[in-house]
Image (cartoon, rainbow, N blue to C red):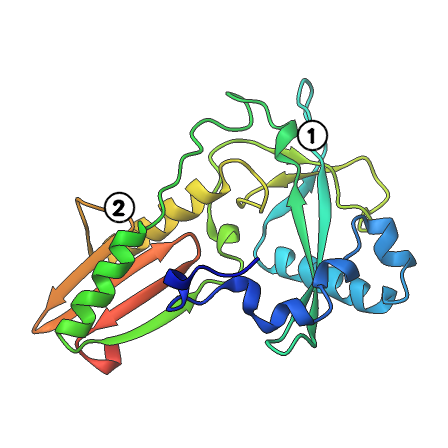
Amino acid sequence: MKKPQWLNDFVSIAESSEAMTVKADDQNPVTYSEAVMSEDRSKWEEAMNEEITSLAENNVWKLVNLPPNCKAIDSRWVFRVKQKADGSVDRYKARLVARSFTQRAGVDYDETFSPVARFDTIRSVLSVAATEKMFVSQFDVKTAFLYGTLEEDIYMRQPEGFSDGTDRVCKLQRSLYGLKQSPRCWNKRFVDYMLSLGFVMSDADPCLFVRQNNGHKLIVALYVDDGIVAATHTEDS
């Protein structure tokens, strides 16, 4: 299909070099068993060990006996081969994700809504930065959801391949990826932190924060766990 002439000034994703490389999805195991039975078993095991270590360092859960009348949710491993821009393999990544479809409304979660910055907001920040000759930078919060604190008591079965051989379950203390309320918990933690630093939340967009102090202006816009910063001084960006 030929691209319409009026789109000549636009870049089409279909024209990127990625289409000429091996798709990462073709290398991704779907289950834990598939990962440990693959020819890249050692790489996937290393990736899973790194994930478990990260979860332990963040005190995401503690092992307890399942209380009476409580139900433990399931989890699963998600595997992905991260690629470089040229299509070559960058690293093997394994993430433990809670199976949110087993969560019960009113028991395992309540509110789940979490705002993200509007695209109009992002464009406005960039426009202001260009007009006022501000310094712009971008940030990505690694394992962002693990910083959120849960308000509910949620129990999860021990991860496949990493059970201690007992019937104990994981009592979650952090908002593990996959939980319905994880984005909301992370956003609340981020907002509280920004307000503690003296930022003011915009009335037009709850994911836009501004701070002005002694001639220094700093603007931050958050989109889930990514964001942009515009500052009048380099030391603030």
Say if 175 sits above or below 92 in the image.
Answer: above
In depth, the one of 44 and 2 nearer the eye is 2
Q: Where, quadrant-wise, is the N terminus in this rendering? A: bottom right
Along the horizontal axis of the image, is 125 left or right of 104? left
Of the residues tagged 1 and 2, which is closer to the observer? 2
Among the 4 quarters of the image, the one containing residue 232:
bottom left
Along the horizontal axis of the image, is 231 left or right of 48? left
Whichever of callouts 1 and 2 sits on the residue coming sooner in the sequence is 1
Among the 4 quarters of the image, the one containing residue 22:
bottom right
Along the horizontal axis of the image, is 85 left or right of 215? right
Residue labelled with disc 2: 206
Q: Position of residue 11 (x, y in %)?
A: 44, 67
Say if 46 sits above or below 37 in the image.
Answer: below
Judge whether residue 42 can be spotted in this image. Answer: yes
Q: Residues within 10 Å of mark 1 (few under 14, many from 20)?
A: some
In depth, the one of 128 and 222 nearer the eye is 128
Q: Position of residue 107 (x, y in %)?
A: 54, 22
Q: Position of residue 129 (x, y in %)?
A: 19, 71
Give the farthest residue toward the top.
69
Q: Residues within 10 Å of mark 2 (few under 14, many from 20)?
A: some
Q: Position of residue 128 (x, y in %)?
A: 16, 66
The amino acid at mark 2 is Pro
How many marks the image carries: the answer is 2
Residue labelled with disc 1: 72
